[in-house]
Amino acid sequence: MPKFKCSHCRLSFDDDCAIVNQNGEKFCCTGCANVYEILHNGGFDEFYSRLGTNTLSPQNTQNSTTQSIQSLYDEYVKDENGFKKISLVIEGIHCSACIWLNEKVFFSTKGVVEASINSTNNKAVVIWDEEQVGLAEILNAISAVGYRAYAYDAGQEELRMSAKRRDFYIKLLVGVFCVMNIMWIAIAQYAGYFTGIDKNVRDILNFAEFILATPVLFYTGSAFFSGAKIALKTRTPNMDLLVVTGATLAYSYSVYSMFSRVGEVYFDSVAMIITFVFIGKFLEILSKKRANDTLDRLNLLSLSEVSVAKDGAVTSKNIKDVKVGETIVLKAGDKALIDGVVTSGEASFDLSSLSGESLPVFLGVNDELKSGSICLDGVVYYRANASFENSLLNKIISMLENATIKKPRIEQLANEISSKFSLVILSIALLTFGYYFYTAWFEKAIVIAISVIVIACPCALALATPVATLSALGTGLRRGVLFKEAKFIESLAKCDTVVFDKTGTLTKANLTVSEFAKFKDIDDGLILSIALASKHPVSIAVATYLKEAKSVNITNVKEITAKGVMADFEGRNLLGGSARFMRENSLTLQDDNAGYFVAYDGELVAKFVLKDELKSGVKECVQSLKKLGISAYVLSGDNEKNVKKVADELKLKYKANALPDEKAKFVAKLVEDGKRVVFVGDGINDSLAMSKAQVGVCMGSGADISLERSDIALLNDDITAFGDSMVLAKRTFRTIKQNLAFSLCYNALTVPLAVMGYVIPLFAALSMSLSSIVVILNSLRIKSTFKAKNG
């Protein structure tokens, strides 16, 4: 049977299994065909000329039925709304240009629905349609452009990072050792220029510098060469290409000068360029790690085991294997990793790690225990009522990961600029070299061109947003604020108007009856029955007040949202609800809009007057918003009297008696008037209004509905957390703008100085590294936003 060579992997296969594209090229599988199309359409055909007669490993080109790919499906691939989802780590990423290239490859792959890469840890989240493309083809696409992708595993990632740090330490030690010795030699050489130095001695010193600079360039700088190789292969210039170009030019010219004994050598500059930039890169990695610490610590929890009680014995079990209904044992110091209900024992729990609640909470039998709570004392047994995947803690981890992946608009803009930045700098360096070569001499031209290449820093520009965003996400979580996507930090910072729901947001929502009046003789049990038919806070307050009564059996129960309940008892109509609800059912009220009313057989029979109190911290939150120049409204479905009382106390504008659709219209009108609105509600009947606002914020102690419906979730009922979120968002956005301004000004100032010949390569390398560190340190200052407040 005739054989053919696959146009992508170059391996030989039987002709009858060939897949032929429209141009007649033959492939062994759809994976190779897809990768070939990606490279060809993206202008990366140089890959095949570089591949030459070599072949690609067959295990990288087989379809997704191979054992290794199948194991990825079994362990790491998840279902996501009918699609497949996996978290990957992309090895070989060095800068924003690398991220841009990999994201472009992902989106060029047919069947990939969504893909985004976190620039601080090179972690990618990819969602794809399994019917159009397999995981093997996706991994092949990344491999084809020079990068390696593998499944993200929290435990393995920690080991990989430890190994990477050790590798960095060794390379750094080599660089520092050689630079220190080169400096002594350089001092001797510079002294010789003034006191006189024998030519042979000078040649020996030059050769010694050559011996010391070589391992620095090729060993310490090996990571830069790897990045530059990818940049050349994919024709996307990056920071590594700038560093390697500058250092290699200086090294090559110095080797020529050393052997020809013409001109000066710059081995000291070569060693210092590589070492200084490497130190900057090392500090950058450590700073990124620090910014990413919150997410890393949460991810490691997914590797934990819990103590499970069964048949009188307690055994350890991986949290992913725990089933709903199993009994988990918590001792002092243990963290609850799965949601459940306490069945035995009692203890105090610390909720500060997730909700920001500073005071311990006491829990006993039948109390709900949320994952993330830390047992402070005692021993409790609790029944798991959710798997780890569906528990609050894992939802928070997933949402925080999602927030770090989804990029704000300002970061997307910065990445677009930095992706073209390196090419612009190389062009400027080439023009600079040409000018000085024509007007001066070769040595001056090459040195100035090297300085131009080295001093430019696309890194600072690329780091301006992601490190600040990560710091803000971690800081927000510690304050009980969860941003579902990083872009909502930017959106919240730009908001100038806040609309508050009243009940459950500004007030405690645990209403109590202050007055109860009967207009007709009616059984309290009948009123209790109609109150129990609704979960509205007002109905709950009435039912609580009448808890000693005995309910009766009512029929044809129908609840009208935000108005009331109607039912039948012994063939007669029974109503319970607001004054508006009563009027809509043809009942007459004498200018009395406040309270809960009950009507039976067409007559008004009872009235309840309820009271509510402001939550602690509400006044302080409103004051902080006013200091930020933000206007605020109270928007509620409650009656005019109650809403006005709250609004007057807080000195806010208000609208009362607003049904859900009216709330939505009110918010929409503000948006139409040019306001940037954030709506803060309890997440239950405010979803429509939230959808009309630029940002929706949910209260609710981390309730599922809050996490699902909102853009930002407050993990406790403390309204001051919302005030903190506004302060944090505005500070973060201000920091990002400072970083971008600094990066652009730095390059606008230093590149012309280098072009004019005022900066030597040594100082160019030093200033380039320092510019990245300045941006990172400025971003990390976000973590201190609330230190003064915490005292």
Image (spheres, rainbow, N blue to C red):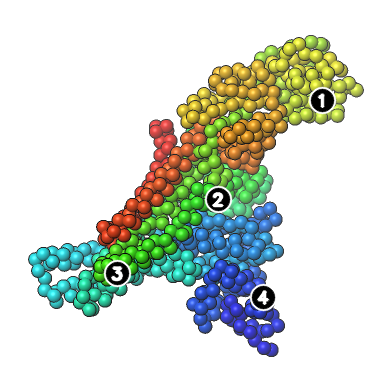
Mark 2 or 3: the one toward you: 3
Nearest the viewer among 300 and 718 is 718
Q: Secondary structure at mark 2?
A: loop
Q: Which residue is mark 2?
A: 406
Contact check, label 4 and label 1, Cβ < 8 Å? no
Of mark 1 and mark 2, the one earlier in the sequence is: 2
Q: Which mark is residue 21?
A: 4
Of mark 4 and mark 1, the one earlier in the sequence is: 4
Q: Which residue is mark 3?
A: 438
What's under tag 3, amino acid-wise? Tyr
Q: Name the quadrant containing residue 644.
A: top right
**Residue shown at 58% from the left, 76% from the top:** 8
Regarding residue 379, the answer to whether it shows in the image is no
Left or right position of 653 against 565: left
Image quarter in which the C terminus is found: top left
Q: Which residue is mark 1?
A: 566
Contact check, label 1 and label 2, Cβ < 8 Å? no
Regarding residue 5, the answer to whether it shows in the image is yes
Left or right position of 438 against 457: left
- The image position of residue 424, as x and y in percent, is 42, 61
Q: In the figure, 719 relative to 713: above or below?
A: above
Of mark 4 and mark 3, the one earlier in the sequence is: 4
Q: Using the numbered discs, state the Cα–Cα distance from disc 4 to disc 2 in whole angstroms.
A: 35 Å
Q: Residues within 10 Å of mark 4 (few under 14, many from 20)?
A: few
